Amino acid sequence: MSNQTRQIVQDSLNALLEDTAFLPELQGDAREQAFTSLGSILSTPNHVHKSFLRIALENGSVVRIPAFRVQHNNALGPYKGGIRFHESVNEEEVINLASLMTLKNALHDVPYGGGKGGIILDPRTYSVKDLHLICKKYVQYFSDIIGPDKDIPAPDVGSGEREMDWMMAEYKSIRPGQPYKGSFTGKSVVNGGSLGRREATGKGVYFTFRYMLHDFMKDQRKFLAGASNDNTFARTALKYEGRPLKLAVQGFGNVGSVAAHEAYQCQYLENKVVAVSDRNVTLFNSDGLDIPALVRFSSLHKGDLPTTDEQLQEAGVKAEIQDRSKVLYLDVDVLILAALEDQIHLDNMDKIKAGIIVEGANAPVTSEADQYLSDKGVIIVPDILANAGGVIVSYFEWMQGRETQFYTEAEVYELLYKQMKTTMDTILPAFFGDPFPLRQNCYIHSVMKLSTVLFRQGKLY
């Protein structure tokens, strides 16, 4: 677990320790001991599995590729979390992401624990045949610890439904005659996947922002106006009420492109996406970008945005071409971070101009930057709240596989928004009513849920 996550969990436990109405059965020394146990349990994973996948590549060479599966906590249900295919993957990162999954599932009342996987590679440098073998080997090496009721992987950065289909097929061949549909989620629809799964995270990211600034604002304006006397975040929210909003989106993969498209077609808020970026470039247009055209272009160019005037002309898009990092520092109202972790940090936090930041990626804002920006009244919608759409719809996929009854795409989104709305309605009043940043409020709620369950299960003795 990263220092940031560990500190926020400990701060949440400290707040709950002082709240005598929480777990009143625990008193005196017994209470102190139980909360010490909670700190230890929540800050460390149950299991860290590591292996080196032996792969005979199509070019004739043999490589050993490091791979991980971390199982953080399963008090609420089977371990659940994606498998990241990226050259920057490391053990500490995977442990931190697994712990975030535990907290995220607890926050949204999804009956899963937290897990995460990773393979250290750049998938763009391998052939399709090589990637297929890598996926099969991953399942072979970790087949004893995964399964529909034990640990259920899903896609993450660098992986998608194709990889999940391959992995599920390998799991099925290793365990013939056993249930296999729920062994992986994020699969293609023809293989038992859920409609809307690919778009779920991005739609959820934009929904959290839209719900806070439109639906909640509309219903709770009187409450927010009263809270604004003492709450800097309430003042920030009111500042943007009813105004035309400029959005920038860092990352144009499954999450960023979908969130940008949701903003482009939103009928509730007057917002326009003026900038998007990927690993190569930032594209900027103060009048707003043609997001559907960019989505079409990227789908035909291995996910990449246009990087030259010729490619912009091919896409039919008007935009200025800027350095990929520029997206972070533009004078916009809202910044959606949908790339990788640690994008806003000690060295660049003072350059951020956005008043609202939405974390579509996992841990894109470091603890120092989080504190600095929160002190300035910037609302940061944290990853644990904003990007849970994927795991929520993964749960729907898992359930559909068990019941062999499948939802329409419209039904999936309706259920997704309903579940995220329930979480927002629980969290937002507390956030705008006390001085804690939104991240701290979310963590307190998650830690409260996990602490209660662990206590009831007798895990604190």
Image (cartoon, rainbow, N blue to C red):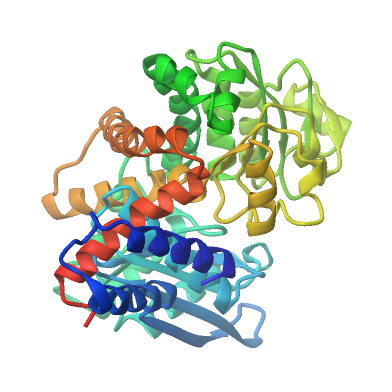
Could you say which is closer to the camera, residue 350 or residue 359? Answer: 350
Q: Position of residue 87 (x, y in %)?
A: 66, 70
Q: Quadrant of residue 261?
A: top right
Q: In percent of the image, x 40 and y 85: which residue is there?
A: 141
Q: Position of residue 365 (x, y in %)?
A: 64, 52
Q: Nearer the viewer, residue 245 or 39?
A: 39
Residue 444 visible? The answer is yes
Q: What residue appears at the point 45 percent right and 64 percent down from the top-left corner?
A: 9
**Residue 342 appears in view:** no
| In this view, 291 is above or below 461 | above
Residue 140 in the image, given as x and y percentages of width and height: 38, 82
Q: In front: 457, or 400?
A: 457
Q: Quadrant of the C terminus?
A: bottom left
Residue 249 lies, in percent from the top left, at 66, 36
**Seen in the image, is 357 located left or right of residue 180?**
right
Q: Quadrant of residue 128?
A: bottom right
